[in-house]
Amino acid sequence: MTLTKLAIIGVGKIARDQHIPAIAGSDAFELAATVSRSGGADGVENHEDIDALLNARPDITALSLCMPPLPRFEIAKKAILSGKHTMLEKPPGATVSEALALTDLAAAQGVTLFATWHSRYAAGVAQAKAWLAERKLNKVEIIWKEDVRRWHPGQDWIWEAGGMGVFDPGINALSIMTEILPDPVHLISATLAFPENRDTPIAADLTFSGPDDLRVTADFDWRQEGPQTWDITVQTEDGTLRLSDGGATLHIDDTKQALEDTGEYPGLYARFADLIAAGDSDMDLRPLQHVADAFMLGRRDTVAAFHD
Amino acid sequence: MTLTKLAIIGVGKIARDQHIPAIAGSDAFELAATVSRSGGADGVENHEDIDALLNARPDITALSLCMPPLPRFEIAKKAILSGKHTMLEKPPGATVSEALALTDLAAAQGVTLFATWHSRYAAGVAQAKAWLAERKLNKVEIIWKEDVRRWHPGQDWIWEAGGMGVFDPGINALSIMTEILPDPVHLISATLAFPENRDTPIAADLTFSGPDDLRVTADFDWRQEGPQTWDITVQTEDGTLRLSDGGATLHIDDTKQALEDTGEYPGLYARFADLIAAGDSDMDLRPLQHVADAFMLGRRDTVAAFHD
């Protein structure tokens, strides 16, 4: 199989830790170039900006956009208008409206556009979805608590307006929630805790409503020291399902399930290859929509200042 | 023509001032009943809740939901599941996700669902849209400034989380913006001013981006005493268009245009009748989407306490 030539735009921590190794192990893509102002990856051709890349390498047909959401729209637009298949790190936009605009643009241009949600490719998610599809749900509890100092040291942009704060990890939980629940839910109340010196929340409590009085609660907190918690527990009429470790571990009624783990980012690139082959796009914006809804509907509490 | 029997759910100020007179003048609907806990309208059968209405009056086939957005979802769901054609006052939901859920539900039930944006039926809007469709836009400026004490005296719900604050009138401007601009725009920056004792903003500054570097600015403020301002100015390569008085007045290059004014709410009910006749729904959620985006992307400033 001929490998599709792909370039990464934005070579930061997520590109080095996840994208580059996943592409190296892919049987569909090869990393043909990068775009980065602060140096690219060892042994890979680098360009200063997307215009230089597009001029120099017409043979590259796929782009993976790894920069933060705020500057991403204009680059995604250029990518799509140049006829490149485009993959977007999460979240797919700084606003839902811009992600909708990109969706329309990609459809008009006939290119593949893929809003990635890496947590959906955690080892236990597909099996959890299949198990829940056949059952009546009573209650869903999401606990997503981590230490922001450990996972986002010195990343100022997540604290600036548009940076989403604790929803940066929380949207991973919402991407699993929207994948595994058989029916849609919508937010009915939210409380967001803003540090007095920051523009994005450090914690959030959410309650969603679904069919037959189903309630889903989500507790996101960036102030968790010690053990980290990324758990989703679903009580059904026919037993309790627990996804933990961000979706990597699955228990059903306290019995640990055997899982095949192919890795989150390898899963994303395999899916991107399938979408390109089929001529399809996948722009599921529900996780981002729930975040926007939480900011609109939520009550704001001011809490202690946060210092990195 | 046989009149379609319609009931109003939620008989408050907007129902009395706008809906009831518009239905009285309609050649498509008759007001057959109301649902209100605080008494209905003179000479019209009233029920305590929607369940009582649905049991008593199977002959009523259309419902107009006029209560605030927070309690509206469950009632809209009942209406749709009972097979009633349903019209929603703006905004169509407390969240975008719930409005999307209602859209899907109405499609599955085969009933008409109509998210109304009354300002789109102001006298100058259709003509403004037609004039702009053929021109290249350079710049759009929206100024929407009114005195909240005059228009929302003692309405506590607009100051509570989910009540939207200044976006309650501002969404009218956004509904005109999304109607008259030929291309989609998306928010790129926002500042929201929250009174220190309130949970919703009293003012907002928004900047949107569109094709060919088009910029749209919007200045919403609820602290305007004296003359009130509801203006949208569009500079094009071929002259300047100004919609003022909330869309009721149209100038092109300072020449006042002759307009036919059929009234905003009569326009809404005529459209509802057309949608029912055609078996269609109209759930354009873009104005609400822009509000959710503004809450997610916007920087929050704290300003002086507001007392009614």
Image: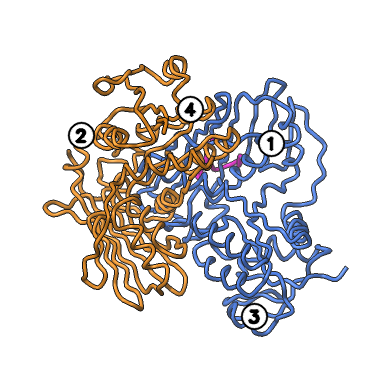
Chain colours: A blue, B orange
Tell me the tag on residue B79: 4
Q: Are marks 1 and 2 on the same chain?
A: no
Q: Marks 2 and 3: in contact by CB < 8 Å?
A: no
Label 3: few (<14), some (14–19) or many (≥20) C-alpha neighbours in 10 Å: some
State which tag comes first along the sequence, 4 or 2: 4
Of A172 and A98, the residue lying toward us: A98
Residue drawn at 61 percent across, 66 percent down: A12
Looking at the rendered image, the disc whose residue lies closer to the viewer, 1 or 4, is 4
| Residue underneath mark 1 | A243
Looking at the rendered image, the disc whose residue lies closer to the viewer, 3 or 1, is 3
| Residue underneath mark 2 | B154
Query: Between marks 3 and 1, how big is the CA–CA gap?
Result: 41 Å
Query: Between marks 3 and 2, how big is the CA–CA gap?
Result: 58 Å
Query: Between marks 1 and 4, how big is the CA–CA gap?
Result: 36 Å
Label 4: few (<14), some (14–19) or many (≥20) C-alpha neighbours in 10 Å: many
State which tag comes first along the sequence, 3 or 1: 3
The residue type indicated by label 1 comes to Leu
Helix, strand or loop for disc 2: loop
Find the magenta span and give its range. Answer: A218-229
Q: Is residue A197 magenta?
A: no
Residue drawn at 29 percent across, 39 percent down: B159
Tell me the tag on residue B189: none
| Residue underneath mark 3 | A53
Q: Are marks 3 and 2 on the same chain?
A: no
Looking at the rendered image, the disc whose residue lies closer to the viewer, 4 or 2, is 4
Tell me the quadrant of the picture where the C terminus of chain B can be found. Answer: top left
Q: Marks 2 and 1: in contact by CB < 8 Å?
A: no
Looking at the rendered image, the disc whose residue lies closer to the viewer, 3 or 4, is 4
